[in-house]
Amino acid sequence: MSYAARFSTWAEVSLQAIEDNVAWFVRHSRARVMAVVKADGYGHGALPVARAALRAGATWLAVARAEEAFQLRQAGLSCPILLLGHWPPEPLAELIAQEISLALWSGAQAEQAASVAGRVGRPARVHLKVDTGMGRLGVQAEEALPLVRRLAAMEGLTFEGLFTHFARADEADPRPTDEQERRLAGLLQALDAEGLRPPLVHAANSAASLTRPHDHFDLIRVGIAIYGLHPSAECPLPAGFSPALYWKTQLSQVKVLPPGRGLSYGHEYVTTRQERIGTLPVGYADGFRRTAGNQVLVGGKVVPVVGRVCMDQCLVQLDAVPEARVGDEVVLIGEQGGARRTAEQVAACWGTINYEVTCAIGKRVPRVYLGEGEPPP
Ligand SMILES: Cc1ncc(COP(=O)(O)O)c(C=O)c1O
């Protein structure tokens, strides 16, 4: 039975595409591959994506929240998992007990982790986060050496890694990232001199993994690219990657309206002649933004969304596809009859980036996983 017979709107995810995209990095890097599956796998579904990434040769997973790490463990994934950012105190014991590696950036956090590790009876695995120019989280690179000395000597901690995050690796100008790299290199030199370098040094996100092989170090942290999405317009994916997510809906009504009819809340669109109008069961509660200028694919053609997007529905102008009928599939992101609508195009229409488009696809939009070997729709 087709998805249109079961769902009003849905997202199809090709796990084969995820596997192929991850495998590209496994082939092209000597470093270990960490698949970043935070935010429910950038909206694709953390668990299926994590499993696909591991099948393809990734050996680490990364998340942003304690609950995201627990979800992976609960599903039986025993691979190393790094919690990239903040952890509140309450789940700390459970994080340590479940062998989730923790990012930390202060002596206070190190002491807290060591003390809880003592109670849990298992060492806390930690990765020191170093701020080399993102300004978000991390000890300043120039101040990191004394903290590393403390970490390395602290009972109850396993000093597993050290990492930084690039702010501008997706830009054509390499200089800001060169500067971050230079700060990291200075610290690593100081650590090497004292024999304090941990086993895993890592810095590269997708953009740096694609363009800066000298920054791969021991592990690369790849997110956006494993979903087949471009890190940016200035840092496009090379050939060999394909997008994994297709967002679809269907026509719930098709009608012909006379001239002068106002459409949707506020009547921002008024028909100027006899017009064919379709209704779609998808709206801003599904993550389809209430922004002017949306377009979708119907009958293999690009058609405009007209009038305001409502919570659960929106309207399309169908004069270009007179053959469109109730129940016909409509593509918000993906391909249809040779026409394409990419997450990047949707992002441009919304004044944002592709990351936000897929992350914001609503919880109530079912994700369905295309079987292995199935042709992309
Ligand atoms: C610390 C860290 N590393 C790696 C990534 C992956 O970045 P990207 O999706 O650009 O590959 C992120 C994502 O935001 C991140 O916050």
Image: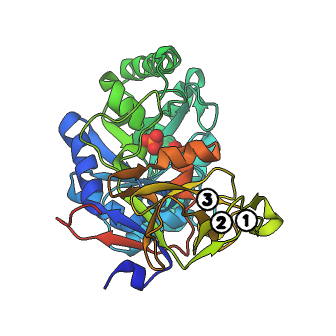
Q: Are marks 1 and 3 in contact (CB under 8 Å)?
A: no
**Residue wearing tag 2:** 274
| Residue 11 in view of the camera | yes
Instruction: Indicate whether 62 appears above or below 2.
Output: above
Q: In the rendered view, does 343 fall on the left or right side of 222?
A: right
**Residue wearing tag 1:** 259
| Residue 203 in view of the camera | no
Could you say whether the residue bearing mark 1 is in a helix, strand or loop? loop
Point out residue 308 in the picture as x, y percentages from the top left corner. Answer: 72, 62
The first of marks 2 and 3 along the sequence is 2
10 Å crowding of disc 1: few (<14), some (14-19), many (20+): few
Could you say whether the residue bearing mark 2 is in a helix, strand or loop? loop
Separation of residues labelled 2 and 1 (CA atoms)? 5 Å
Please state which of the two labelled residues, at mark 1 or mark 3, is closer to the viewer.
1
Q: Nearer the viewer, residue 376 or 261?
A: 261
Point out residue 10 in the picture as x, y percentages from the top left corner. Answer: 46, 72
Q: Are marks 2 and 1 in contact (CB under 8 Å)?
A: yes
Which residue: 27% across, 55% down?
Answer: 17
Q: Amino acid at mark 3?
A: Val
10 Å crowding of disc 3: few (<14), some (14-19), many (20+): many
The first of marks 1 and 3 along the sequence is 1
Separation of residues labelled 1 and 3 (CA atoms)? 17 Å
Instruction: Indicate whether 168 appears above or below 193.
Output: below
Q: Nearer the viewer, residue 188 or 203?
A: 203
Which residue: 23% across, 70% down?
Answer: 371
* Picture quadrant where residue 361 is located: bottom right
